[in-house]
Amino acid sequence: MAEMVRKSSADEILNHWILAVSCILLIITGFAFLFQMESVGSVFGGFNTMKTVHNWGGVIFSLSLLYSMRHYLKDAFEYDADDRQWFKVAGGYLSKNVKVPPMGKYNPGQKLYYLAILLAGIAISLSGFGIWLMKENATVMLLSHLVHNVAFIIFVIAVPVHIYLSTLANPGTFRIMVSGTLPLETAKKKYPKWMKAAGKM
């Protein structure tokens, strides 16, 4: 049996799932509100109930997003020469003939994705609370709706790409979100700098 190495802790896995499920729920209900999709609203028992689900789902998403900073924020701000080279070869996604530099625990694409989701998530959360709790303030409502919609577009584009890259584009990656582990040999191949720092190379 292949030796396994842990990449994600139990609380990281749990929080990732909470963030993912709440985010997808918010996207679905957000679409239903935006396009007045009564068929989706009926699944929740009507638009009023769906609004309650959306609002409190937003609370869960916001708390989960803030907690995720404990796991990813430090790494997301650390870049070196190998990361810059990774950008030059587009991580090897566009061609199998390029040499991809050795990576640490996360590649720079993942780091930038996290920062984009963090910023868009904070924007969509704050604007969502503005829409929910400050209906009497016309200026806040106008700005909140604008920010909410722009951030929503970012999520609608970024989340499906993230799901694809974490599953079909990189077979075996999804298991990390389930068990938190991956084979040692795979870790050495994909994350050699991380493995070296951990004393496993």
Image (cartoon, grey):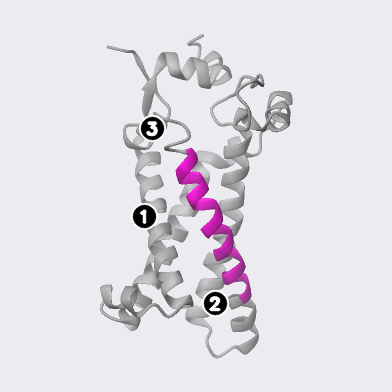
Identify residue for label 1. 21
Tell which circle, 2 or 3, labels the residue nearer the N-terminal end: 2
Q: Secondary structure at mark 1?
A: helix
Q: State the residue at coordinates (34%, 83%).
A: 48
Q: Is residue 156 above or below residue 198?
A: below
For label 3, the residue is: 176
Query: What crowding class fits label 2: few (fewer than 14 Cα within 10 Å), some (14-19), or many (20 or more)?
Result: some
Residue 10: horizontal and vertical position, in percent?
34, 36
Q: Which residue type carries mark 2?
A: Gly
Position of 181 with respect to 95 (left or right) is: left
For label 1, count other residues whose C-alpha is less than 10 Å away and answer few (under 14), some (14-19) or many (20+): some
Q: In the drawing, does residue 55 fall left or right of residue 78?
A: left
Return the residue at label 2. Answer: 130
Neighbour tally class for label 3: few under 14, some 14-19, many 20 plus, Cα within 10 Å: some
Number of labels in the image equals 3
Mark 3 to mark 1: distance in Å? 17 Å
